[in-house]
Amino acid sequence: MYELSHRVRVFVFSFQEARPHYLLLRSGHGIESFWTPLHGPIGFAEKVETAVAREVVDETGLGRPVELIDLDLTSQVVLGDERVIEWSFGCRADRSDEPRLDPRWSEYRWAEVTQAFPALELEADRAALIRLHTLLHAA
């Protein structure tokens, strides 16, 4: 029997000189931390879109999202007796202010896709980034 939990993975982006830049975060936990998109839990009875907006505001201080893009990608991971389902979204943020990170994050950087892609450790994150980048260029 598995305990089921749901999480969001949010690729925060903004446009600079008409090109998307993606917010990458690094955890403050140890020297082996890696660059990642924003991620966090979905609360009980919380809508996925509400969880995305809450995570952006609470974890980065960037304010309410300007636009949400459902990347239509989910991934499942089994960790012992826990099954984690993650929902991937893109989120355009107003970048008039620099992020004010929650203490669980040690640093951040804005990166173009050519820098962001190789910096991401997980293959699912790379696939989500490419999907978002492709959707942004198709619009």
Image (cartoon, rainbow, N blue to C red):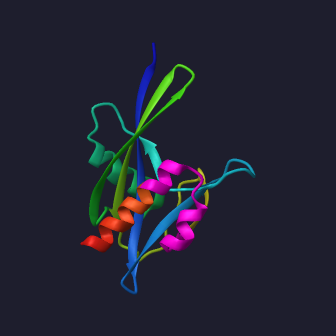
Q: Is any part of residue 63 visible from this angle?
A: no
Q: Quadrant of residue 4?
A: top left
Left or right? Give the position of 102 relative to 74: right
Left or right? Give the position of 79 relative to 93: right
Q: Position of residue 124 (x, y in %)?
A: 48, 48
116 up-or-down from 88: above or below:
below
Q: Residue furthest top?
A: 1
Picture residue at 28% right of the left edge, 59% below the top:
68
Q: Quadrant of residue 12?
A: bottom left
Residue 4 within the segment the image draws in magenta: no
Q: Position of residue 60 (x, y in %)?
A: 47, 60
**Helix, strand or loop for the magenta stretch, by majority:** helix
Left or right? Give the position of 109 relative to 15: right
Q: Residue furthest bottom?
A: 17
Q: Which residues are magenta?
A: 110-127
Picture residue at 42% right of the left edge, 30% below the top:
5
Picture residue at 73% right of the left edge, 48% below the top:
30
Q: Quadrant of residue 91?
A: bottom left
Q: Is any part of residue 99 visible from this angle?
A: yes
Residue 123 within the segment the image draws in magenta: yes
Left or right? Give the position of 33 relative to 103: right
55 up-or-down from 96: above or below:
above
Q: Position of residue 47 (x, y in %)?
A: 26, 41
